[in-house]
Image (tube, rainbow, N blue to C red):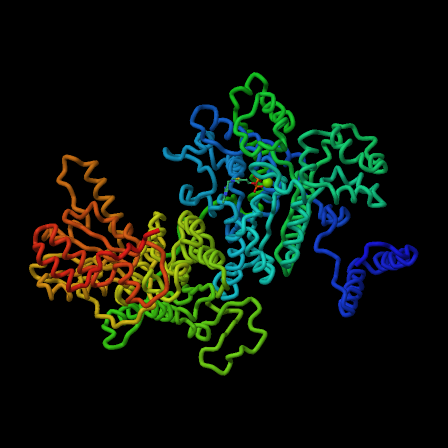
């Protein structure tokens, strides 16, 4: 399309026509007509050229702004005190050499955005479910400062900002693990807040659609930085929010135009860019660009010349206008067009500098929030223009402002003066916190606003309902031998989940979650049995409607089939795994995924789930480097148990038999949902089919603790430890060794991670109590009857089983799958990685040779029979 106007008269006739429609019939009618015209153009083959962005100005025209009902001046006084106390707590934390850090500039740019929310919108939890607010992590000082004015925190608390080891301390950022009755959502790792918030809103609607937790008009507010929006997680799920029309979701992006090192989009416009991205995904976009001091100037802009300048100015320059002041702005912005310069001729340089940005104007922010909470049919994003380091004098909008932790006395005084803080020059060096007396109008106003909104936030619910145990039959079925029937442990877990879904006690709490892998795990029967949740129901006849296991989507479906997004599915799991706290309604989510695409893919989210005190099951289905055999290097996981072990409250298991899976899940439900411990479980299951024995008597406690003796052997000379898929190789090795007259016993290790935890605890206890008789670790207890050599083999890297070395007093060798995976048969892969029965036998005979149980002739003979290739390169060779 050419931009050249070849017939200006005709153009003005069209413009007049549309103007008269706007005036006489309104903007909606005008938009309708234009969309009809656009459709016609499309039919003729034109590609629409109108873009997704609107001019760089406020989305809400002045005449349509909802008026803010409260006391502007009172609120400014309160907000100023919050600003001051937030500043002081960071300055104090950095007065000595501790270098505790903290941030001043982030909250100073966001204070109004939060304040308007706290004063008018964020609902508390008195008698209702509170709004969920994902605060931007670096704003924490401002949130603490408000809680201080509210009387929840005291000066000692503020003085202990970032001094958490000796309580009471305030955590650097929002961490429910560290402040369990305060913060609800761990967010400070950029991008996690946005994706977790989106799936929270999605889960809220899911719970309500199933009739479990009524949604009412509860909202999820997600506050984030404009730099943060570059994280793939931040924007990665906005399509889901648009598609699912999550009107319960409000994003507030604080567009202060800067991130840590410099401008977010020096050469562009982040607000415009985000507007296009969000609008394209079906969101309501509300831009809050200019504050009300601009209104009279904008009113003069009848020809759109000022708007033209606003539309082309880049963010790097906008930053300069705040960093360099009014004279600079007059010269480098307004003076670009003489007519625009004329519009500000009556303003002093100082007046120009004070032309406020939308995100610092409570009226504009109120109008935006008001529109957002009353919008229907789509999520809303508010893009608010602010200034980073607002109020910090010469540090305002400077490129280093993010990391400012100390301010010069001049800057502190200018901050005090700007916000009229009642601190005298004689006191200011001491940096006093300021809290008016309890009966002061400020504190009374503050308390009243929160009372009207239903109480204080943030607060995290720590107590929740204890669930009852499901029918034990569900688990006991798997305690029996499978006989000749060959099944996989993945099938076993799916059977448990299927039965749990039908359980009369806790059936409704069970949620299977998959990222498009249900068929891989043999879960397709659940499609029809419980349905897949879709807010739209099913508007089409599924292709397989005539089949038994047809693809059923429904509005009250139970299963969450999130599509190919492990980060998204994990975020949904996190929302359900914390439902006991955030919805006061415990849910039991089972998230099944390829184990390689679990922790390795989304470890930061898993870490945050631990912080959030999530409870539920993560199932690394089709796991094991040699067990998921045909999929090759990127799929074959040999380290997820190492990764899971890094999360303190994650209990991980690598079971081999169906009864082990059953015991572990039963115990997990008991621990997490009946005894209410804040753990979550990671269980690897495999897709290798074999027959399963019945549960050995008395093995339950060992299965739970991490190890039990599976095959006893009187006068055994060696112990073989096997785990998951490789346990059966250990059993075969026992039989192989018998051929060489070597007697072995076999142990099933369900969790080397738990054995290590136990060992560490016991070791520490012994160190702390030198005069007491040393206690044995669980491993030592198990092996106390003899000190024969031990061989451990797993489908994971050697470091997984190496963890128990300190607790084994005899000769100990480990075998594992170090190195990159590759495709081949299981048999070949186990030979290649040296975790098969032959390799276990090799290690066992070597251990016996080293301990002089067998002679050199014997070992030579054994190696020959086993066909040990001494020239084979090691599998982890690089
Ligand atoms: C995943 C992750 N990467 C890096 C950081 C370090 N970091 C903390 S704040 C920040 C800049 C934030 O900029 P922005 O999102 O614009 O927030 P602002 O402080 O400007 O409001 C960075 C890079 C982090 N917290 N998380
Ligand atoms: Mg920023």
Residue 503 vertical placement versus 390 (above, below): below
Q: Residue furthest top?
A: 426
**Residue at position x 52%, y 50% in the image:** 132
Q: Nearer the viewer, residue 508 or 335?
A: 335
Q: Residue furthest front?
A: 871
**Residue at position x 55%, y 19% in the image:** 427
Q: Residue furthest bottom?
A: 546
Q: Is residue 426 visible?
A: yes
Q: Is residue 169 rendered to the left or right of residue 314? A: left
Q: Nearer the viewer, residue 267 or 427?
A: 267
**Residue at position x 49%, y 57% in the image:** 568
Q: Nearer the viewer, residue 258 or 184?
A: 258
Q: Position of residue 263 (x, y in %)?
A: 62, 38
Q: Is residue 753 visible?
A: no
**Which quadrant of the figure has residue 240?**
bottom right
Residue 426 vertical placement versus 356 (above, below): above
Residue 506 vertical placement versus 165 (above, below): below
Q: Position of residue 522 (x, y in %)?
A: 39, 71
**Residue at position x 91%, y 59% in the image:** 10
Q: Position of residue 877 (x, y in %)?
A: 32, 52
Q: Is residue 194 rendered to the left or right of residue 66? A: left
């Amino acid at each position: 399309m050419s931009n050249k106007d070849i017939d200006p008269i005709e153009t003005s006739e069209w413009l007049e026509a549309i103007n008269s429609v706007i005036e006489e019939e309104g903007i909606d009618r005008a938009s309708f007509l234009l969309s009809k015209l656009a459709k016609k153009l499309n039919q003729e083959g034109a590609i629409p050229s109108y873009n997704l962005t609107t001019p760089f100005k406020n989305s809400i025209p002045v005449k349509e702004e909802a008026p803010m009902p409260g006391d502007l001046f009172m609120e400014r006084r309160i907000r100023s005190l919050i600003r001051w106390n937030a500043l002081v707590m960071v300055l104090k934390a950095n007065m000595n050499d501790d270098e505790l850090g903290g941030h001043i500039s982030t909250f100073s740019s966001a204070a109004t955005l939060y304040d308007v929310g706290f004063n008018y919108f964020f609902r508390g939890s008195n008698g209702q479910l509170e709004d969920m607010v994902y605060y931007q992590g670096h704003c924490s000082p401002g949130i603490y400062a408000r809680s201080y004015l509210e009387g929840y925190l005291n000066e000692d608390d503020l003085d202990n900002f970032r001094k958490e080891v000796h309580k009471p301390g305030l955590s650097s950022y929002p961490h429910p693990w560290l402040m369990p009755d305060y913060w609800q959502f761990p967010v400070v790792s950029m991008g996690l807040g946005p994706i977790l918030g989106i799936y929270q809103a999605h889960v809220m609607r899911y719970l309500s659609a199933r009739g479990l937790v009524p949604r009412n008009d509860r909202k999820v507010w997600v506050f984030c930085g404009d730099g943060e929006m570059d994280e793939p997680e931040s924007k990665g799920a906005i399509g889901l929010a648009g598609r699912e029309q999550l009107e319960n979701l409000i994003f507030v992006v604080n567009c202060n135009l800067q991130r840590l090192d410099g401008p977010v989009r020096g050469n562009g416009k982040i607000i415009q860019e985000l507007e296009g991205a969000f609008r394209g995904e079906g969101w309501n976009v509300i831009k809050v660009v200019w504050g009300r001091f601009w209104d009279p100037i904008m009113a003069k802009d009848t020809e759109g010349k000022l708007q033209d300048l606003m539309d082309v100015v880049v963010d790097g320059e906008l930053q300069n206008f705040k960093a360099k002041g009014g004279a600079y702005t007059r010269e480098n912005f307004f003076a670009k067009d003489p007519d625009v310069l004329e519009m500000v001729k009556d303003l002093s340089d100082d007046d120009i500098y004070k032309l406020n940005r939308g995100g610092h104007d409570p009226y504009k922010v109120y109008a935006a929030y008001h529109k957002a909470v009353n919008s229907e049919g789509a999520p809303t994003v508010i893009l608010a223009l602010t200034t980073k380091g607002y109020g910090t004098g010469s540090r305002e909008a400077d490129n280093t402002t993010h990391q400012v932790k100390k301010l010069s006395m001049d800057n502190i005084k200018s901050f005090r003066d700007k916000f009229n803080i009642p601190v005298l020059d004689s006191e200011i060096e001491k940096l006093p916190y300021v809290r008016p007396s309890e009966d002061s109008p400020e504190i009374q106003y503050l308390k009243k606003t929160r009372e009207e909104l239903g109480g204080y936030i943030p607060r995290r619910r720590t107590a929740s309902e204890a669930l009852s145990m499901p029918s034990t039959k569900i688990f006991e079925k798997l305690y029996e031998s499978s006989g000749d029937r060959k099944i996989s442990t993945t099938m076993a877990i799916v059977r448990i989940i299927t039965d749990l879904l039908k359980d009369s006690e806790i059936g409704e709490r069970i949620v299977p979650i998959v990222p498009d892998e249900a068929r891989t795990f043999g879960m397709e029967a659940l499609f029809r049995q419980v349905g897949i949740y879709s807010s739209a129901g099913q508007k089409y006849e599924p292709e397989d409607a005539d089949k038994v296991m047809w693809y059923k989507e429904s509005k009250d479906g139970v299963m969450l089939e999130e599509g190919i997004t492990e980060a998204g599915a994990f975020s949904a799991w996190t929302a359900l795994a914390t439902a006991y706290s955030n919805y006061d309604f415990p849910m039991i989510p089972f998230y099944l995924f390829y184990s390689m695409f679990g922790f390795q893919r989304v470890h930061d989210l898993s870490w945050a789930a631990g912080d959030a005190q999530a409870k539920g099951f993560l199932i690394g289905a089709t796991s094991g480097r040699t067990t998921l055999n045909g999929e090759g290097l990127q799929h074959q996981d040999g380290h997820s148990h190492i990764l899971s072990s890094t999360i303190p409250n994650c209990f991980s298991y690598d079971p081999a038999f169906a009864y082990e899976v059953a015991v572990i899940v039963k115990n997990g439900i008991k621990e997490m949902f009946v005894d209410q411990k804040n753990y979550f479980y990671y269980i690897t299951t495999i897709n290798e089919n074999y027959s399963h024995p019945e549960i050995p008597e008395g093995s339950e406690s060992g299965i739970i603790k991490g190890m039990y003796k599976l095959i006893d052997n009187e006068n055994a000379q060696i112990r073989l430890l096997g785990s998951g898929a490789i346990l059966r190789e250990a059993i075969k090795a026992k039989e192989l060794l018998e051929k060489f007259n070597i007697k072995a016993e076999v142990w099933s290790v369900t969790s080397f991670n738990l054995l290590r935890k136990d060992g560490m605890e016991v070791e520490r206890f012994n160190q702390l109590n030198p005069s007491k008789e040393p206690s044995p670790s669980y491993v030592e207890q198990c092996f106390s009857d003899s000190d024969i050599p031990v061989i451990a083999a797993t489908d994971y890297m050697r470091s997984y089983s190496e963890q128990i070395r300190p607790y084994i007093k005899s000769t100990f060798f480990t075998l594992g799958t170090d190195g990159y995976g590759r495709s081949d048969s299981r048999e070949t892969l186990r030979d290649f990685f040296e975790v098969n029965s032959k390799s276990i036998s090799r290690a066992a005979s070597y251990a016996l040779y080293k301990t002089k149980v067998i002679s050199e002739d014997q070992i030579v003979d054994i190696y020959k029979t086993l066909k040990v290739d001494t020239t084979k390169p090691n599998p982890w060779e690089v």
